Image (tube, rainbow, N blue to C red):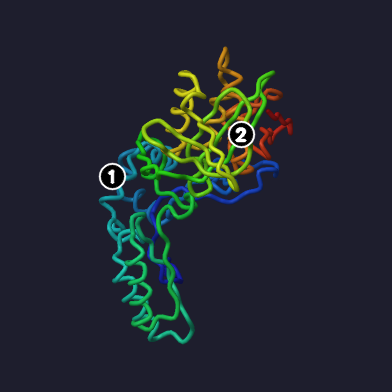
Amino acid sequence: MTQTTSGIEPLFQPFYTRRKKINANNEGVKVDFTDEMGDTWQEFQVLHPKFQDWLFIKYKNKYPNESFESWYSKIDTDNFFKTSPWYGCTANDIKWEDRVNVQSTIQKYISHSISSTINLPKDISEETVSQIYKMAWEKGTKGITVYRDGSRSGVLITDNSKNDTFSTNNSIKRPKEVTGEAFITAAGDKKYSVFVGLMDDKPYEVFAYLGGTKVGKGSILKEGSGNYVFLGEGDNSRHRIITGKMNEEQEIITRLISGSLRHGRGINYIVDDLNKTSGSLFSFNFAIAKVLKTFIPNGSKSSTTCSSCGSNNVIFEEGCSRCLDCGSSKCG
């Protein structure tokens, strides 16, 4: 009746992109995003109905002969939002101290437990989160939660967080030693040794050269500039994986791949690029791609098209590329 929410949560955003978790195998669904866990999501736009009403009333004279849907696509929503009553009052704008105070005040007059979620920026410290829970307890609240921006891969995405601008990402400094794993893989009639350094159980760097060596888990140790060795588990064996093993072209390629991994580029895109190469270096690139594929979560989106039906709806699954439209699978 009053056109207000029944809860105590502030407005998240008047407009944003929402992601709905889906089963990629279902008919009629469109996979717009695959997160780091391999879960698939479909995106759809959300526009708060009262913000839409406000826009229509305030600016309908700007496009008098067009429908709202038609002229809304032409306007700069961010600039319009800055002149609206909601600017500075959304979930991401309100100070966490004020959120706790409001909830604790309301809790005094409510018999059952109530809770709300405090939205926090990406760079929030653990100490601040601790302060939030402590203050909430001291104020007598019975429940409270926090959500740090970016802690999940964008279930709710404000428009200014879309990947529509070019940005850079700096990697963390490499420790002297990282965990690693050694592989032997075949490409054509050649065998290659591939070493993958791991950070947080994800590929962080890669080295490879022609010829086979021992396989298994271990660590990759940096010994001076440009000199790395693989230390196998359970013994003192050392395999020099750059000095004396890699030629100039192999070193350049693995440096570029390692740089992409360290700066956060998705492994699925790196694998797709490696598989698109041709010429004398194809088998070398293909060998690295075969190993990196094993680290790609099932369901991750591929940037390639299906060779059977031409669909772009291709995902990685158990080291293979599978088309969700026609079901064809290709392994390498």
Residue to which mark 1 is pinned: 79
Number of numbered tags placed on the structure image: 2
Q: Residue at x 45, y 74 (%)?
A: 115
Q: Is residue 118 left or right of residue 33?
A: left
Furthest-top residue in this view: 279
Furthest-left residue in this view: 83
Q: Residue 222's x, y, as percent?
A: 42, 38
N-terminal of the pair, mark 1 or mark 2, is 1
Compare residues 96 and 194 and report the one nearer the observer: 194
Q: Residues within 10 Å of mark 1 (few under 14, many from 20)?
A: few
Q: Residues within 10 Å of mark 2 (few under 14, many from 20)?
A: many
Label 1 – label 2 distance at C-alpha: 47 Å
Compare residues 50 and 81 and report the one nearer the observer: 81
Q: Secondary structure under badge 1?
A: helix
Residue to which mark 2 is pinned: 291
Kindly identify the amino acid type of the residue bearing the numbered disc 1.
Asn
Q: Residue at x 60, y 48 (%)?
A: 234
Kindly identify the amino acid type of the residue bearing the numbered disc 2.
Val
Q: Residue at x 57, y 42 (%)?
A: 232
Q: Is residue 229 left or right of residue 321?
A: left
Q: Residue 135's x, y, as percent?
A: 33, 77
Which of the 4 quarters of the picture holds residue 215?
top right
Q: Quadrant of the C terminus?
A: top right
The mark found on residue 245 in the picture is none
Q: Is residue 120 left or right of residue 275?
A: left
